RNA sequence: GUGGGUGUAGCUCAGCUGGUAGAGCAUCGCGUUGUGGUCGCGAGGGUCGCGGGUUCAAGUCCCGUCACUCACCCCA
């Protein structure tokens, strides 16, 4: 049976996985530093709950059923589908556990999600998202909308990657604006304007007119979409367009508050960008997208927004706001371009050599002593010639080889195989430099962006 | 789902107008039973994606199919 990769289901080599784990560690630590506890939700939800929550995501949902299911049970099984994001399951989780949670409730969630779309560069059918969300009962304070991008900005600052720009908008701005100039189909207009970067202003105007706008309305939409500022000047720019509507004012105030918080706490990380719309249609206010400087064509690496009515049991509504890092897309870019590398392909910092099979217990004892002090190591698989054992370590990037009984005194020696330096050492006291203890994940030069 | 491209060794590919498979890299082994990276020698590994057709003969031409890939759609 021929084995081949399955498109859209990426798998990593050990050295790449080390990079991924480092990223996940940084994300987790930062989320926890901001006080977010973790939850994990099941991989499946009733299809009914998934449907209609994510716009066109409907047709991307993977249904599950038993292979051996007969007609009757197949129908029942097919009511389950794999989740396509972590926000919809979270909303369900909140409703289900509302009695056990304290509000406002915040949580982070790092899990795989699945979407049955055509894979291509940066787009997968199975991928990892890292989400943070805050929900409250009845009302959600607006300052949480400012908190989300601040946490994310901190994550990106700690990772060995090019600068990230978090673009923020508020859907109330285009909504109020469109209504203010007499456009009724807000969602449809938004969808067309969202293509601005891809197809250009002329095509957008063309499509807007085709969708029923007057040429004047189309130009107004383009003028709004063109506004972008790293400070609060976007407010004046919108006002200058001379449109007024209560919803527009609400949106401008809300967005100004978010940008203000960004200017104070994460200078340079955020920008107000009034063309950002987002595809998932449960967003009702603030929306976020994130581009990596120099790789704008890869799309957003981190998105989210505010949703006021996603979680509701009919009596009580739990409005929330959240944002999600596309871990797989980010790694897919960085690894394929060689923008980030791990210093070795194994956690082992030391290879303990074996002189002969009879003395293996001695080597194992040395390894045990090293591990007791937190030094990751492994024992050589064979008592091969030392050249071979060194090469074994070298192939894997293990920086040190430990030679039992190599010292004149009868004690041990340890060799840094990068420099060739070899010194007497005692397994109960020897300590490698801190940077050698764990694999280092660092930014690599990019020859061709 | 729609349209284009590609499909030969683990990887990157060669194989000209059809005559029954090659290179580089990688892997493993050997090179004075004990300290690697260079170098030398050698080995393993391919029903040329799969199925059918044309032909004396197909990796090479034709059809189909599958997979991968790119674009659209949509999105992290």
Image: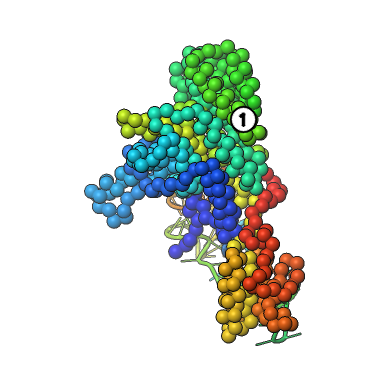
Split into 4 quadrants, where in the image is the N terminus of chain A?
Answer: bottom left
Colour style of the rendered protein structure:
rainbow
State the residue lying farthest toward the left: A72
Q: Residues within 10 Å of mark 1 (few under 14, many from 20)?
A: many
- Observer-nearest residue: A170 or A63? A170
At a point 60% along the width and 70% down the height, the residue shown is: A370
- Observer-nearest residue: B65 or B33? B33
At a point 65% along the width and 48% down the height, the residue shown is: A160
Residue under numbered circle 1: A271
Q: Position of residue A146 (x, y in %)?
A: 55, 31
Q: Position of residue A349 (x, y in %)?
A: 63, 65
Q: Position of residue A449 (x, y in %)?
A: 67, 44
- Observer-nearest residue: A427 or B62? A427
| A59 shown above or below B35 | above
**Image position of A282 (left or right of A340):** left
Q: Secondary structure at mark 1?
A: strand
| Res A323 seen here | yes
| A63 shown above or below A392 | above
**Image position of A319 (left or right of A11):** left
At a point 63% along the width and 45% down the height, the residue shown is: A158
At a point 75% along the width and 67% down the height, the residue shown is: A419
| Res A210 seen here | no
Mark 1, chain letter? A
Q: How many marks?
A: 1
Q: Position of residue A49 (x, y in %)?
A: 34, 38
Quadrant of res A409: bottom right
- Observer-nearest residue: B14 or A334? A334
């Amino acid at each position: 049976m021929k084995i081949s990769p399955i498109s859209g289901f990426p798998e990593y080599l050990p050295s790449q996985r080390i990079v991924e784990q480092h990223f996940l560690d940084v994300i987790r630590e930062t989320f926890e530093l901001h006080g977010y506890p973790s939850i994990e939700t099941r991989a499946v939800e009733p299809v009914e709950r998934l449907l209609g929550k994510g716009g066109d995501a409907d047709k991307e949902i993977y249904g599950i059923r038993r292979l051996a299911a007969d007609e009757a049970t197949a129908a029942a099984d097919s009511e389950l589908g794999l989740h396509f994001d972590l926000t919809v399951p979270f909303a369900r989780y909140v409703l289900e556990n509302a009695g056990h949670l304290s509000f406002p409730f915040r949580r982070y969630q790092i899990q795989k999600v699945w979407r049955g779309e055509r894979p291509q560069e940066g787009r997968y059918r199975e991928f990892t998202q890292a989400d943070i969300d805050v929900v409250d009962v009845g009302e959600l304070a607006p300052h949480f909308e400012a908190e989300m991008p601040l946490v994310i900005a901190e994550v990106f600052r700690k990772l060995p990657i090019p600068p990230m720009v978090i673009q923020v908008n508020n859907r109330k701005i285009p909504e109020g604006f469109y209504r203010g100039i007499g456009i009724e189909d807000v969602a449809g207009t938004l969808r067309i304007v969202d293509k601005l970067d891809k197809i250009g202003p002329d095509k957008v105007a063309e499509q807007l007119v085709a969708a029923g706008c007057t040429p004047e309305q189309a130009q107004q939409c383009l003028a709004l979409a063109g506004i972008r500022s790293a400070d609060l000047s976007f407010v004046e720019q919108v006002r200058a367009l001379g449109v007024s509507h209560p919803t527009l004012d609400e949106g401008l105030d809300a967005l100004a508050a978010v940008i203000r918080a960004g200017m104070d706490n994460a200078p340079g990380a955020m920008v107000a960008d009034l063309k950002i719309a987002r595809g998932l249609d449960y967003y009702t206010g603030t929306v976020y997208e994130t581009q990596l400087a120099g790789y704008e064509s890869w799309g957003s690496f981190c998105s989210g927004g505010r949703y006021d009515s996603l979680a509701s049991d009919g009596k009580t509504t739990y409005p929330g706001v959240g944002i999600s890092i596309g871990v797989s897309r980010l790694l897919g870019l960085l690894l394929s371009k060689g923008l980030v590398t791990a210093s070795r392909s194994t956690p082992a910092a030391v290879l303990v050599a074996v002189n002969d099979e009879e003395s293996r217990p001695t080597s194992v004892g040395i390894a045990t002593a090293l591990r007791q002090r937190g030094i990751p190591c492994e024992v050589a698989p064979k008592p091969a010639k030392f050249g071979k054992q060194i090469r074994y370590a070298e192939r894997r990037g293990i920086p040190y080889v430990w030679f039992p009984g190599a010292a004149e005194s009868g004690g041990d020696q340890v060799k840094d195989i990068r420099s060739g330096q070899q010194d007497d050492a005692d397994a109960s006291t020897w300590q490698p430099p801190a940077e050698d203890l764990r694999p280092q994940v660092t930014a690599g030069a990019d020859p061709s962006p």
